[in-house]
Image: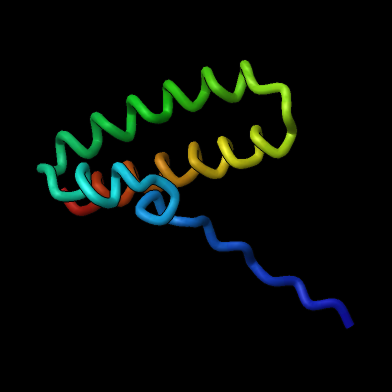
Amino acid sequence: MFRFYKKYPISLDYLDILYRNTVSKLPVSNRIKYCESLIHRTKDDISNANCAVQKRKLKKLLKAAKIEIFKLNQNN
């Protein structure tokens, strides 16, 4: 039989080294602002990307940033 595994989203800590090493140590409000900025930049990059593989990677980053904002807002 086929096994269908649920794909769990990759965390922003794993995808973004700057976030993991620097931004994650800042206050929550600054982390939210960073994620919002990252979302806007990533949307622009997706619209300008020609390569399907690059778009897929950027969409993962976009989803991870949205999830991170959701988590940060829940903790407040």
For the point 24% across and 44% down, which residue is it? 73
> From what the image shows, is residue 30 above or below residue 10?
above
Please tell me which residue lies in front, 17 or 69: 17
> From what the image shows, is residue 63 above or below residue 40?
below
What is the residue that sits farthest to the left in this orientation?
27
Left or right: residue 34 versus residue 5 is left
Q: How is the image coloured?
A: rainbow
Left or right: residue 42 versus residue 29 is right
Please tell me which residue lies in front, 68 or 23: 23
Q: Where residue 74 sits: x, y (%)?
A: 25, 51
Left or right: residue 52 versus residue 39 is right
> From what the image shows, is residue 66 above or below residue 14?
above
Image-quadrant location for residue 36: top left
Q: Where residue 56 sits: x, y (%)?
A: 65, 40
Left or right: residue 21 versus residue 42 is left
- State the count of labels: 0
For the point 65% across and 22% down, which residue is it? 49
Please tell me which residue lies in front, 8 or 53: 53
Q: Where residue 52 sits: x, y (%)?
A: 74, 33
For the point 69% across and 71% down, which residue is it? 5
Image-quadrant location for residue 14: bottom left
Please tell me which residue lies in front, 73 or 25: 25
Image quarter hosting the N terminus: bottom right
Q: Where residue 34 sits: x, y (%)?
A: 27, 32
For the point 33% across and 25% down, which residue is it? 37
> From what the image shows, is residue 60 above or below residue 14?
above
